[in-house]
Amino acid sequence: MVAIREVIPYKMDIKLSEPFSISFGTYTYAHGSFVVIRTTDDIEGYGEGCPDKLITGDNQEESLIFLKRASKYLKGAQINEEEVHRILDRVERELFPSQTARAAIDMAVYDILGKLENKPIYKLLGASEPNEAPAALTIGLRSIEETRKKAEYYMDRFRKNGLRRIKLKLSGHRESDVQRVSAVLDIFPGEITLDANQGYKDPKMAIKSLEEIYAISGKRVILIEEPVPKGRLDMLKQVTESSPIPVFADESAATLEDAKRIAETGSAAGINIKLQKAGGIYYARKISQVAKENGLKLMVGCNEETTVAISAALNFVASDPAIMDSDLDSDLTVANIQITKEDPLDYFKNGIRYPTGKPGLGISLKEWLKDVLNGRIEIKRPG
Ligand SMILES: [Mg+2]
């Protein structure tokens, strides 16, 4: 019987290739974690945690403390996702929740399960062919002119990948938001998704803004995420009921419990699932089930993640035909460091990002990174 021999957590700090702004702040670093799980028969699984207190509820320090405790209890456990999550429930009871630590361990376990069955995770989850949801490339909050320039840059850089969808961050200021969308509609022929990250304090103003955007875009703008403050489901419902553009919950729909509340109250038309909020693929699938039972649409998003965590999300998207938008791009944009041997751009075709199709997550780590993880290279700042 295959069991877990060791779980090794690492602290991972990534300097973003450029500062990334949304309505509530600017990011320059992604402070996260990396985890390697080794089995008794020497199979390795990889996972990544990308905490952001405002979105995932935990920070890097909490995530690492959680991983350390989990590594003790997981030693000797079977490679079985339910059993692993039960053990993580115990860690959560003793410490605190850390959805990103949970997600990191979860994806490493699925990586191993796939390698044991010699199947990519999406096939392990029951799909015979990958679900194809167009990938959205995100433009952070910038001036109108810089937004236009960034759209042109993406259109050029991802032309051979068939880019068909761009995501725009909104500020919550009606006039500039409408201008921002208009500037991209003028030059980009594809579809646009929007994300206000709670920027509109007044639901009436959000509705007015969305009506104006709809008047110039029609069906080309396909959704708006989190227009109003997190957790104000009354406001969210108000926007959902009047907006001509479908409203998705993101920050307000972090966990399975949140998703159930959104469904019960009918406060959104869809949910943005992120593995880092949900606690991994195991819980993402449960959220998807709730969405299906309640007629909610689904998209999958990310934080500032590398290709490791993105590969888990790509497999999840590929596994589930209900997912209509794949907002997975951080490893091509802000967290653009190549740590896998596979080049993610080779699997971005006709506007769709595919998992590589190799077993598990479908990735292998570059040798230098394996050398770091195995302790053969030690990298420290001087002084
Ligand atoms: Mg969002």
Image: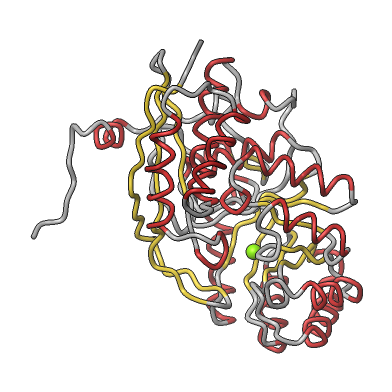
Q: Is residue 358 left or right of residue 291?
A: left
- The residue under the point 55% across, 39% down is 311
User: Does residue 171 appear to the left or right of 109 in the view shown?
Assistant: right
Please identify the residue farthest to the left as the structure is shown: 383
State the image quarter where residue 252 is shown.
bottom right
Q: How is the image coloured?
A: secondary structure
Nearest the eye: 154 or 102: 102
The quadrant of the image that shows the C terminus is: bottom left
Residue 255 position, x and y percent, is: 67, 54
Q: Give the residue furthest to the front.
A: 94
| Coordinates of residue 230 in the picture (x, y in percent) | 68, 72
Residue 377 falls left or right of residue 269: left
- Residue at (38%, 40%) from the top-left corner? 339
Can you give x and y, in whole percent of width and height, for residue 130 in the image? 71, 31
**Residue 244 or residue 156, whichever sits in front:** 244
Count of residue discs? 0
Q: Quadrant of ligand 1?
A: bottom right
Residue plotted at (57% across, 42% down): 89
In this view, 117 is above or below 365:
above
Q: Quadrant of residue 183?
A: bottom right
Camera-nearest residue between 133 and 296: 296
- x 80%, y 78%: residue: 235
* Residue 164 coordinates in the image, percent (x, y): 69, 53
**Above or below, comparing residue 130 to residue 296 in the picture:** above
